[in-house]
Image (cartoon, helix red, strand yellow):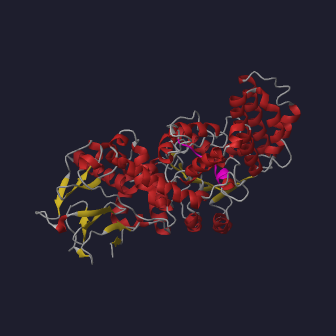
Amino acid sequence: MDHLIERELSDERRRYLEKTLNPDIALRRTAYDDQGKPPCDQDTRVNILADILTWVNDVSSESRNFFWMTGDPGCGKSAITASLARYCKDSGTLWAQFFINRNNEATTNPRVYFPSIAHQIAEHSSNKVVEKAIYEILRAKPSLLDGMSLDQARVLFVQVVEVACDLDRRKPVVIVIDGLDETTRKSLKDTATIFSKLFKEMKHPNAKVFISSRTDDEITKPFYRSLHSNKDHVVHLHLNTSDPLCMEDVSRYLSRNLQRLVEEWDLNGQVWPGRERFEKLCHRAAGLFIWAVTVVRFFEEQLRLYGHDCLDGLLDAISAEGMDDVNNLYQTILTLTFMSNAKSSRNAWAHETFRWVVGFIIALKEPLPLGDVGVLLDLRHTSTSDPINNVLHFATNLRTVLVAGTGEITKDTIPRLHKSFVEFITSAEADEQFRIDLDVINVEIALKCLRLVSRLRNKDNRSRIPPGSVHYAIQNWSRHLPNDGIASGVAIFGDVDLFFPKIFASALRQDVVSFSGDYRTHMYDPRQGFPPPPSFHFSHSSTIEVGSIVTSLAISMDGRLIASGNHGGDVRLWDSRSHKLICEPLREHSNLGPSVCFSPDSRWIVYGNVD
C-alpha cells in the first residue's frame, strides 16, 4: 500500500511539473541536435575540448563550478558547446542543456531558462528526490515562475542543482547553456547580471555549469565584475581566432572538405584549388570557422549547379583582398549567386523572393518547416506556380548561407540562418537589393497570416492547407505587428462543422473554445479528433435572446481564464477549469458585442466596441 501511495504521489508530482515547468512544446527542443548545432569535426578543437573536459571531471574541493567561454561571431562556440554536450550525454553526466537560438524565439525568453532546466533535471534522475524537491519548492512558492529573478535562480537553479549533486558527490552534474547573447535584447543585461551573481552561489564541487556567449557589453560587464571577485569559482576561456591552434583547426577543416569535393567531382587537386590558392584561402579565413564553412558550402552548391567551369573564377573572387571580412564574403556570395544566372540578374522577382523568404526565416517566431513557409508566403511568379516548390527551389540555391546541418532541402526542412548572416543582411552593409527591413517584413507576414486564415472559409482549401501553417498563422500573426506582445483571439461564427474544420482544430494543438448556432460555448480537445464530444458545455442563457449571442472569445496566456463578449454588451469572465462564471457580467455601453482579449501577463482584459 505504501508503494502504491508513493507511486500515485510521484505521478501527481510528474503531472504538476510537466504542466508548470515546460508547457510549451518548443521548449522541449533545446538540445544541440534539436537546434541544428553540429559538434566539432573529430580532429578539430582537440586541445580546447581536452581542457574543458578536464574541468568537467574535476570534482575535487579546489574545482571551479562555472566555465564561461567567449568568442567572436562565427569562431565555433556552438560547435564546441555541442561537442561538450554530446560527450557528457554519452557519459551520463549531462543533466540539462539549453541552446538559446534566435531561430526559435521560444528559447530566447529568459523567464523559461531555469524552469526548463529544472524540468530536465527532474527527468534525468530515476531518483525521486530531485523531482520531489522541485515539486515542494513550487508548491511552497508558485510565484517563482512569474519571471526570471535572482530569487528564482537561487532556488529553482542553484538549490535544485545541489540536490542533484548530493545524489553522488563523485560524479559531475553538468548544465550546458549556449548562446546567452541570443537572449531577447531587452532582457539581456538583467539576465547576464543574474547569471553573474550565481558564480559564488554554488557550493558543491561536482556542480558544473558551462556558459558560452559572445563578448557583448551587456554580458561582459557584469560577468567581468563578478569574475574579478570570484576567480575561485569561474574558469574563463576566450576563443582567439588569431591563435595558431585555431587557425590550424580552420585550415584542417578546409583541407579535408576541399579534398572531399576534389574526390566527389573528380577534380585535379594540383590545379584546383592548388597549394598556393589553398594557402590564400586559409589566410583569408583568419581562424574563423563560419568563413570556412560558408565557402565550402558555396563551392559545393556552385559545383552542383554549374559544374567544373565555374571553379577558377569563384576561387579567385573568394581569395581576393578584403575577403577576410565575413560581411564581404556574404555580399560576394550573394552577388555571384544571383549574377551567375542571367535570368535572375534581369528579373527583380529573384531579389523580391530573396527578401521574402530570407526575411520570413529571420522573423520566424517559432521553428517552421519550409513547406509551411511556402503555404504562408504563397509566392507565385505566375498563376500556375506552386508556392511550396518556389520556396524549396529558392532555399536549395540559398544552401550556402543556411547553417551547417540542414542536409537535403525538403518541405520538412526547418531553415536556420547563422547569426552573423542575419546581422549582415539586416544592416546597411548589405546591398539594398538584398537588404531586409524587419519592420516591413513583419507587418507583411502578419497580413499573410490573416489571409491564410481567411482562406479556410473555402471548403476546398481546408483539406489542402497543412495544419502547421494554420497553427502558426493563428498563434503568431499579432506577434509580427510593431507593438510586441499583443494577445489575440480568433472567433468562429456559425455552424461548427462548417467553420471549424478538422484541419483547423488539429492545428491549434491545445484546447479549443468555439461557439455555434445553438448559443452555447464548447471546449474541445482537438487531439481526440473532430468533431469530438465536448468536454463541457456552458450556456449564457437557456433561451435564445439578444444577450445570449457570443461575439468574441479569448483565452488568457496562462490558460486559466476565458473571456467572452456578448451581443447584449456583456463581457463575462469564466474559469477554464471549473467552467464557472467568476464574476457578474461587465456591462458595455453599446448593445453590440464587444471584442475581447487578454494582456500577455493575463492580468488585464481589453475590450473594444463600435463606440
Identify the image quadrant of residue 231.
bottom right
Q: How many marks?
A: 0
**Residue placed farthest to the front in the image?**
383
Where residue 313 appears, x then y in whole percent? 82, 35
Q: Is residue 220 left or right of residue 255?
A: left
Residue 97 colored in magenta in the image: no
Q: In the image, residue 245 lies at what x, y percent?
A: 78, 43
- The answer to whether residue 292 is above or below residue 177 is above
User: As rendered, which of 338 and 348 lies closer to the eye?
Assistant: 348
Q: Residue at x 61, y 36 (%)?
A: 396
Locate residue 462 relative to residue 58 in the image: left or right. Answer: left
The image shows residue 521, relative to residue 529, as above or below, that is: below
Against 352, is 281 above or below?
Answer: above
**Residue at 36% of width from left, 47% of height from top?**
456
Residue 123 point in image, percent of width and height: 41, 47
Between 483 and 232, which is closer to the camera in this rendering?
483
Q: Residue furthest top?
A: 266
Front-lying residue, 205 or 85: 85
Depth check, front residue: 93 or 262: 262
Q: Is residue 415 magenta?
A: yes
Point 77% across, 26% down: residue:
308
For the view shown, which residue lies furthest in the left direction?
Answer: 543
Q: Which residues are magenta?
A: 414-422
- Residue 37 in view: yes
Where residue 303 sits in the image (x, y, percent)? 72, 30
Q: Is residue 58 visible?
A: no
Image position of 500 (left or right of 70) = left
Quadrant where the C terminus is found in the figure: bottom left
